[in-house]
Amino acid sequence: MVVAKQLTYDPWSWQVWARQLAFESAVGFDSGGASGWKPLPVIVSLPFNWIGPSAAPLVWVWLTRTAMFMIPVVAWRLGRRAAGFPGAVLASLSAAMLPGATLFLGGLTEPLSGLFLLMAVEAQVRGRTHRSWGAGLLAVLGRPEVIAWVGPYGLWAVWKRKLEWYWFAAGLAGASLLWVGGDWIGTGKPLGLFGKAQVSAEPQRLQAATHPGVEILSHQVVPLEVVICATFAFVASLVWREQVSRTLGSAAITSGLAIAVATEFGYPGVTRYMVPLVPCVFVLAGIGLGRLVGLLRSPALKWTALVVAVAGLVVLAGPLALERDRADWNWYAAREGRINDLPALVKAAGGRLALVACGDLVLTPSAEVSAGAWAIDVKLKDVARGDLRLPKPGHHAQLDVVLASEEAVARNQAKAYGLQVVEVARSRYWVALWVGQDGQRPCRPSSVKGR
């Protein structure tokens, strides 16, 4: 978390759009491409483009990682309020055991949305309704599905006269406008985001199931023991009128069920949409264990039970978290070197204009398309997702940016189709190959120079 600094696919797309909106890009704003628009990362990153060329991506990735560190801190405060010191220790530890944490090292919005949701719960139980409403709206800007709890909560606050109706209306309208307006301005399609999600491979796989709503719930990597402890804490909160657990449970249940039901009826949901709710479940589980420890009267028994509960959490949740983190880290570390090397390829080619002038851009592997769009400074939709596509007869020439390890495959495929191949530039991990028809003038590294 300290050394690695690169973003993953969608976050690079948001950085491309933030730079375009800041007028620091060589091209105009266009939110077309495979990634979905998200207002939170674009708005946060936009002003940092005026500091330096790499400031915005670094700020965003460190902001999301800070959120991952802050989740156990907020969990401590919630646990202490609900079940005293044992609840604080166990809720914080539970939140630190979230499985798959390294998957979100690369700047995805789910850690921030999860943190803001916990902060909204904390502010609500402390009676700070305006702050809670604001934190909830920030969670919505990162993941719209949490509106299933944030929206009804706002209505309840207005009904109880804890929140003015104009703050509720302004917040809801502002969040809706930011979600719809980005793609509307960037592509001219107000519902473009929904259309992109529908054609994505992961939602299509879920929709192919007999019951997509059940399928999306079954894919959640939450240990059964955690679910049992969280359920106990929620049920106990209803009996003993304990507000923290009741609010955490309502946030997780309403949003989770809304996602599952919507997915069942065609919403292009994926398992990642549930992630902001997972901290609520783990914190609830910690509170449930803390409440059980707190039932003991003897201080010695309490400390013994607390130690046993801590050990049990580590044994039950730790291996799953480490297993997923190790696999995710290996994948992330392999990408780190490749993405770091993309600017070197652009420099070796003589600048972005030299690459753009060589033909239609195709980048392989497709997982690095958005990073390539950032490095070359082009519109996301102008970089084709690769897997070594070749130009059809009569089409323009193209520039294949491929991993050096895949160069032989690219050359052999082009040769099999009778196409010309000319090396334009090379770096440690990448090679740029001009691919064209017989009779077309090849692109040379020195043919165009410039930014």
Image (cartoon, rainbow, N blue to C red):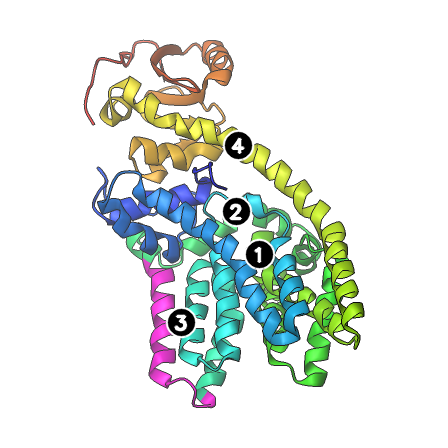
Dot 2 and dot 1 residues touching (CB under 8 Å): yes
Q: Which residue is mark 1?
A: 275
Indicate whether 38 appears above or below 55: below
In the displayed structure image, the side of residue 227 where residue 445 appears, left or right: left
Q: Give the amino acid type for the residue marked by disc 2 in the picture.
A: Phe
Name the quadrant containing residue 341.
top left
Q: Which residue is mark 3?
A: 134
Q: Which mark is residue 104?
A: 2
Q: Earlier in the sequence, mark 2 or mark 1?
A: 2
Label 4: state its secondary structure.
helix
Q: Quadrant of the C terminus?
A: top left
Q: Earlier in the sequence, mark 3 or mark 2?
A: 2
Q: Give the amino acid type for the residue marked by disc 3 in the picture.
A: Gly
In the depicted view, which residue is nearer to us: 119 or 14? 119
Identify which residue is drawn at 38% across, 17% down.
427
Q: Earlier in the sequence, mark 1 or mark 4?
A: 1
Residue 331 screen position, x and y as percent:
57, 33
Magenta run includes residue 362: no
Residue 104 screen position, x and y as percent:
52, 47
Q: Give the amino acid type for the residue marked by disc 1 in the picture.
A: Val
In the depicted view, which residue is nearer to us: 104 or 292? 292
Indicate whether 384 appears above or below 39: above
Instruction: Give the residues drawn in magenta, as a range.
Output: 159-181
In the displayed structure image, the side of residue 401 where residue 29 appears, left or right: left
Q: Residues within 10 Å of mark 2 (few under 14, many from 20)?
A: many
Dot 3 and dot 4 residues touching (CB under 8 Å): no
